[in-house]
Amino acid sequence: MSIQTGDKIPAVTLKVMGEKGPQDISSEEIFSGKKVVLFAVPGAFTPGCTLTHLPGYVVNADKIKAKGVDTIACISVNDAFVMDAWGKSQNAEELLMLADGNCELTEALGLVMDGSGFGLGNRSRRYAMIVDNGTVSHLALEPTGAVDVSAAEKILALL
């Protein structure tokens, strides 16, 4: 069963790129006492994610933060090196690029997508959520292949 509105974000450790390489970051550190917009993509550098999903958040980052959001985080079942390179290539300096390389948060949320037919293995479904102090206040889960309800413009309208 997947996470629902009103549920708490599970306690897991993710990775981000630090000055000396990948470093741990806990879900508590990301979400505790903060308003966070978290959006997930099936894969960095993939067409829908690179051409549509991530750019909307890059372009609208200031507007989203102006609505009281402390952090905009992009997560994917990729490693920290890939997430860092993708973020840099897309001018995503205002976003926290989270690596869920072991699929731990994605599995804990119940949002795993089987991408083995495309040679991707287990990945995350595409979604966006608004998280207030660790509790999901809105979840926008996309049907396979779509980038609509989780788009930055749709999330911005809900803030």
Image (cartoon, helix red, strand yellow):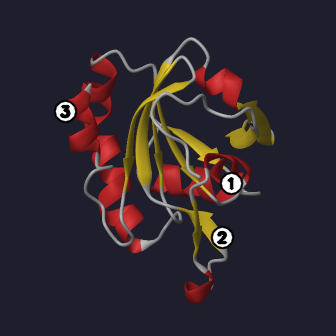
Residue 13 is situated, as x and y percent measured from the top left of the image, at 77, 38
Q: Secondary structure at mark 2?
A: strand
Q: Is residue 98 visible?
A: yes
Q: Are marks 1 and 3 in contact (CB under 8 Å)?
A: no
> At which x and y percent is residue 44?
52, 63
Check disc 2 and give the amino acid type: Asn
Q: Is residue 87 above or below residue 48?
A: above
Amino acid marked by disc 1 = Glu
Q: CA distance from mark 2 to mark 3?
A: 31 Å
Instruction: From the viewer's side, name the closer residue of 86 and 68.
Output: 68
Q: Can you give x and y, in whole percent of width and height, for residue 140 in the image?
A: 36, 46
Q: Quadrant of residue 5?
A: top left
Seen from the viewer's position, the closer of residues 143 and 2 is 2
| Residue 84 marker | none
Q: Is residue 157 left or right of residue 115?
A: left
Comes first in the chain, label 1 or label 3: 1
Q: Which residue is mark 2?
A: 122
Looking at the image, residue 155 lies above or below residue 122: above
Contact flag, marks 1 and 2 (Cβ < 8 Å):
yes
How far across and down, in percent of the image, does residue 143 sit? 36, 65
The residue at 24%/30% (across/down) is 158
Q: Which residue is mark 3?
A: 157
Disc 1 target residue? 107
Query: Residue flagged by tag 3: what amino acid is it?
Result: Ala
- The answer to which of marks 2 and 3 sits earlier in the sequence is 2
- Kindly give the residue lying farthest to the top in the view shown: 33
The CA span between labels 1 and 2 is 9 Å
Mark 3 Cα shell of 10 Å, populated few (<14), some (14-19), many (≥20): few
Tell me the crowding category of disc 1: few under 14, some 14 to 19, or many 20 or more residues within 10 angstroms, Cα based. some
Query: SS at mark 3?
Result: helix
Mark in the foreground, 1 or 2:
1
Residue drawn at x 61%, y 53% as measured from the top left: 110
